[in-house]
Image (tube, rainbow, N blue to C red):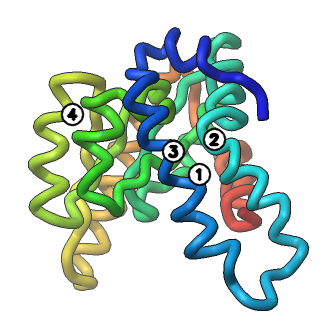
Amino acid sequence: MADYRKMWEELGMDVELHDQLCAVLPQAFGDVFLSQENRPDSMDYYNMVVADIHGIRPAELIEHQKKGGKVFGTFCVYVPDEIVFAADAIATGLCGGSQFWVPGARLDRTCPFFRIADMFIGETTCDGKKKAWEILAKDVPLHVMDLPQMKRAKDIKAWAEEIETFKNVVEEFTGNVVTAEKLAESIKLINNK
């Protein structure tokens, strides 16, 4: 595994606190995943990525930014990543399923993905997240998508309007237009993922 300390320091991370966090992760990953009976050999690539989770992908994202690209940090599968990729940007997940991640990963500076993202994309799936967006918006550009709670015609229409608004935000933030052709390519990419 490469040494990414310089990259983490340049991101403004708390490297000592990050090291403490990373000291417990291999044991936890091993206990939960690597100990599984009949684990397929084809999982070796995934195992390698997880072993170097704060190095390989963050370095790729930083390289994208150096070339003028934008990185959007997302917290939920409801965010339409297809729009982000259609604007020649990259969407990366920010581990939104844990209560630890906002205070620990962003505010305590222990996660490179939180440090790299140029803009966060939140959504209104729960009250806790809604409060988190207020806090994060003081620290980094943030767009919140209002996720309908039901599937009525008016909710579907409202969600379509949210997606259109999101597209406009992404276009403005990246300076790139989302064309039908780029969107079709991105839909295929995300569906294949």
Q: Is residue 137 left or right of residue 6?
A: left
Q: Which residue is mark 2?
A: 86
User: Crowdedness of circle 3 by 10 Å Cα count: few (<14), some, many (20+)?
Assistant: few
Q: Is residue 50 left or right of residue 177?
A: right
Instruction: State the mark number for residue 136.
Output: 4
Residue type at numbered disc 1: Glu
Mark pair 1, 3: CA separation: 35 Å
User: Crowdedness of circle 1 by 10 Å Cα count: few (<14), some, many (20+)?
Assistant: many
Image position of 1 with respect to 116: above or below: below
Image quadrant containing the C terminus? bottom right
Label located before the other in sequence (3 or 4): 3
> Is residue 133 visible to us here?
yes
| Residues at marks 4 and 2 touching, judged by CB atoms closer than 8 Å | no
| Residues at marks 2 and 1 touching, judged by CB atoms closer than 8 Å | yes
Which of the two marks, 1 or 4, is nearer to us in this view? 4
Which residue is at the far bottom? 37
Q: Which residue is mark 3?
A: 23
Mark pair 4, 2: CA separation: 25 Å
Q: Secondary structure at mark 4?
A: helix
Label located before the other in sequence (4 or 2): 2
Q: Secondary structure at mark 2?
A: helix
The image position of residue 178, as x and y in percent, is 58, 37
Mark pair 1, 4: CA separation: 24 Å
Residue at image position (55%, 24%) is 70
Mark pair 2, 1: CA separation: 6 Å
Label located before the other in sequence (1 or 4): 1
| Residues at marks 3 and 4 touching, judged by CB atoms closer than 8 Å | no
The image position of residue 88, as x and y in percent, is 65, 31
Which of the two marks, 3 or 4, is nearer to us in this view? 3
User: Crowdedness of circle 4 by 10 Å Cα count: few (<14), some, many (20+)?
Assistant: some
The image position of residue 45, as x and y in percent, is 83, 58
Q: Which residue is mark 1?
A: 82
